[in-house]
Amino acid sequence: MMTDFTTDFSAIHDELRSVAADLLAKDSVDWPLLVQAGWVGLDAPESLGGAGATFAEVAVICEELGRAAATTGYLGGAVLGVGALLAVAPNTSRDNLLTEVVEGRTRVSLALPGDLVPGDPRVPFTVTTDGRVHGRAAFVPDAGDAHRLLLPARDATGTTVLVDAAATVIEQPVLDETRRLAIVEADGAEARDVWPLEDPHALARRAALAVACDSLGIAAAMLDATVSYASMRQQFGRPIGSFQAVKHACADMLVQVTAARQLIAGAISAPDAHTVAKAKSYATEAAVGVAGKAMQLHGGIGYTWESGVHTYLKRAALNRSLFGSPREHRTMLSARYRSAPG
């Protein structure tokens, strides 16, 4: 049964946000700190060392990471890597690897292409009957820091599987310096383990929804920063926040943040292809708009390196493209309604 993270566990989520904000305020947040905080195994089973929570709690962490514009390997290593292992039926090899990841002894990354839209039937890798893996995935989050790579592949029977195999990792520089993306290539690598995936599209939906949550955090941070600045900055002897044009701009930003939060809440409660597409398309586009407006309302200082607004704007722009652009998601949604009877 899915939980409504906006009501059922609001007090727990508020406390989790508070703890996350304090931890992310540190000068550096490395992987051992994320493991120690319990975030890596947040939705892993308690029997394997995890917290036994749900994606609703992972979503809170993703939002706070976006709010802090934090540079971590959480997206690729925990959200996607652990999520991929959770998408496999329990078995000895999978359970052992998941336990190692939760305990911080091993880091994994899911080689899911960053340009893959949920619902797209493409699978980046193939595994032959002799257990060799071939293929390529681009814009893979946090692959460079992984000890083990998990490759979504199609086997000789056409079944979509998850393969634990070695592969070549080539870093891909991007404008957003808070993210690390890479190309993952496999050319005949031997598979250590091959596990059938119960729902191949669930991985892409989880990735898109996590990025939407990150974008929500970006937008919320930029709204808070702009309101604070407008309350403090004086012009003509009064705070600029008292001017109607600034009030309306901040109100529009609040509307976008509120709408994004509601769409994301709906997608977390029922994470099908269409709710995720609505949340991803709206939240990531809203984050770019809110960050851009924040830069304008900060005036000249908003365009300086010291303000930090550029960090959020670049992260929001990358989020908008990762795992499906708003246009791609909306094209999928419109196709659904065009094909609906009546």
Image: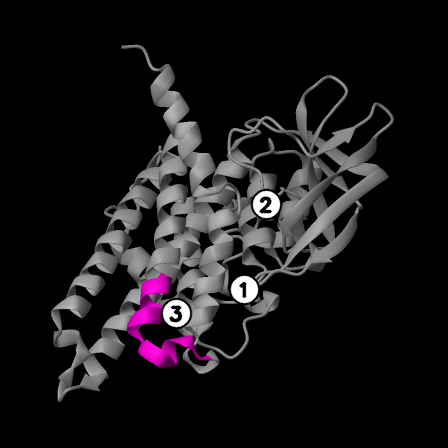
Q: Is residue 274 left or right of residue 39?
A: left
Q: Is residue 237 above or below residue 278?
A: below
Tell me where residue 87 sits by quadrant.
top right
Label number found at residue 21: 3
* Marks 3/2: CA–CA distance: 27 Å
Tell me where residue 154 sits by quadrant.
top right
Q: Identify the mark nearer the N-term, 3 or 2.
A: 3
* Marks 1/3: CA–CA distance: 13 Å
* Marks 2/1: CA–CA distance: 23 Å
Secondary structure under badge 1? Answer: helix
* Magenta part of the chain: 291-304
In the foreground, 48 or 154: 154
Q: At which x and y percent is residue 279? A: 36, 42
Q: Are marks 3 and 2 in contact (CB under 8 Å)?
A: no
Q: Are marks 2 and 1 in contact (CB under 8 Å)?
A: no
341 is within the stretch colored magenta: no
Label number found at residue 114: 2
Q: Residues within 10 Å of mark 1 (few under 14, many from 20)?
A: some
Indicate the amino acid at tag 1.
Leu
Q: Residue at x 30, y 46 (%)?
A: 5
Secondary structure under badge 3? Answer: helix
Q: Residue furthest top?
A: 342
Indicate the amino acid at tag 2.
Gly
Q: Residues within 10 Å of mark 2 (few under 14, many from 20)?
A: many
Q: Is residue 189 above or below residue 109?
A: above
Viewport quadrant of the C terminus: top left
Viewport quadrant of the N terminus: top left
Q: At which x and y percent is residue 235? A: 18, 85
Q: Residue at x 36, y 80 (%)?
A: 300
Q: Is residue 221 left or right of residue 148?
A: left
Q: Which residue is mark 1?
A: 34
